[in-house]
Image (cartoon, rainbow, N blue to C red):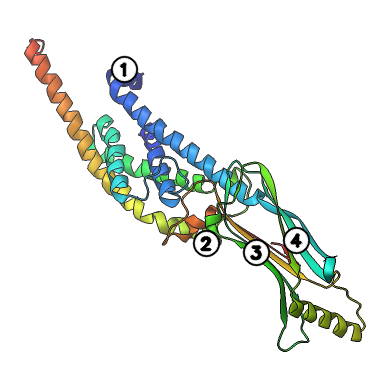
Amino acid sequence: MGLMALLSAPPIAFMTFDFMFPNISTPSLEKNLMVVFLLSILTAIPSAYFTRRTDLAMVTVFLYTAVGYILAVALYSAPYTIFNLEEVLPAFYYALFFRFTIILLFLFILGGFIGTVFGQMIRDMIKREETALIFKDGKGT
Amino acid sequence: MAILERVKEHWITVTMYLVFSLFFLSACLVSVNTYGAIAQAQRDISLENPVEGADIVPHGDVNISFSIQLNNPSRYTLHVYTLSWYAKLVNASSTNDRVITVGDDYSGPTTYLEVPARTAITYTFWTVVSDPVVLEKLNGFINYSKGLGTEYTLETLPYEHSFSVIAMIGEFEHEYVREGYLNDIVTVDLRYSSLEGIF
C-alpha cells in the first residue's frame, strides 16, 4: 500500500502543478478538467488491481492523493527551497495555490474511487479468463 | 519475497505501472526545472549602466541622449513587448508649462525587438531639441534659475529621464485573461527614472 502510494503520487503531483502553471509545465493538460478526471481514474486502477480488498484500495486512493498533493506543494515551493530565490508572485502565495487546486482534490478522490472499481473489474476479468483457460486445457480437473 | 513473486507474476502490469509513474515523475522534474529557471531569470534580468547626456550641437541646438543596458543572463530569449523613453525638464515655478518635454521614443509589440539568451543589449536614445519654442522655455528656466542664484546651461539643466521595458520570457504563453498571475510569472517589467534609479 505504501509502495503504491509512492508510485501513484507523481501523476497527482504533476496534475496539481500543471493546473497551477499550465504555461510553463511540460507536457501541459491546459487546465482541462476532463483530462484530469480521466487521468485520476487511470491512476487509481493499479491500486485496485494489486489490492484484493476494495476498502484498502480506497484507502490507497486517499494515501496517494495526500502524498501527491504534498509533493505538488514542494514543487510549487521549489524556487524558494531549491533555488533560494525571492517570491515571483505577490503575497498570498500559498493561499493562491490552495484556492486554485482544492477542486482537484475532489476530482482525484472521485476519479480514484471510480478507478478502483475499474481496476477490480479488470482483475476479475483476467482471473475469469485464466480460470477458463485452465479448465479448457483440462489442468483444473 | 512475496512482493517479488507477485511482481514476477504480473510483470506486464507492473512494468506499465512503473512507466506510467516514471513518465509523470519526469514531467514533474522537467516542469519544476523550468519554473526554477524562470524564477532565476526574473531575478537576474536587469537594467544596468544608465548614462544621461546633454550636448550643444551646431546652431545652438541641444542634443539630449540616454543609454541603458538590458542584461539577459537567462537561458531564454526575451521578447520586448514595449520599450519607452521619455525626457523632460520640470519647471515647478511655471503655471502653464510645468513639464517641458525634450525627447521621447516608443517601440511596441509589432517592432519584434529581442534580447537573445545570455546577452546584453544597450539601448541608446537621442533627440536634438531645435524647436525655438522649446529652446525658449529652456532658456527661460536658465534665466529664472540665475535669478535665484543657480547657474545652469543647456547642457547642465536637470533633465529627468524615464525608461521602461516590458518583455516576455521565452515562448511561454502570456495572454491569459482570467489567470493574470500566469502572465506575471513570464513577464519582466523593469524601469529607470533619474529620480528613483533602477527599480
Which of marks 1 and 4 precedes in the sequence?
A: 1
Cα gap from disc 3 to disc 4, whole angstroms: 11 Å
Disc 3 + disc 4, Cβ < 8 Å: no
Q: List x then y, in percent, for residue B5.
A: 31, 18
- Which residue is more in the foreground, B23 or B140? B140
Disc 1 + disc 3, Cβ < 8 Å: no
Q: Residue B92 appears in which quarter of the rendering?
A: bottom right
Q: List x then y, in percent, for residue A33.
A: 31, 50
Going by the numbered disc 4, the residue's amino acid type is Phe
Disc 4 + disc 2, Cβ < 8 Å: no
* Dot 1: chain letter: B
Disc 4 + disc 1, Cβ < 8 Å: no
To which residue does mark 3 refer?
A: B105
Disc 2 + disc 1, Cβ < 8 Å: no
* Dot 4: chain letter: B
To which residue does mark 4 refer?
A: B66
* Callout 4: SS: strand
Cα gap from disc 2 to disc 1, whole angstroms: 49 Å
Cα gap from disc 4 to disc 1, whole angstroms: 72 Å
* Callout 1: SS: helix
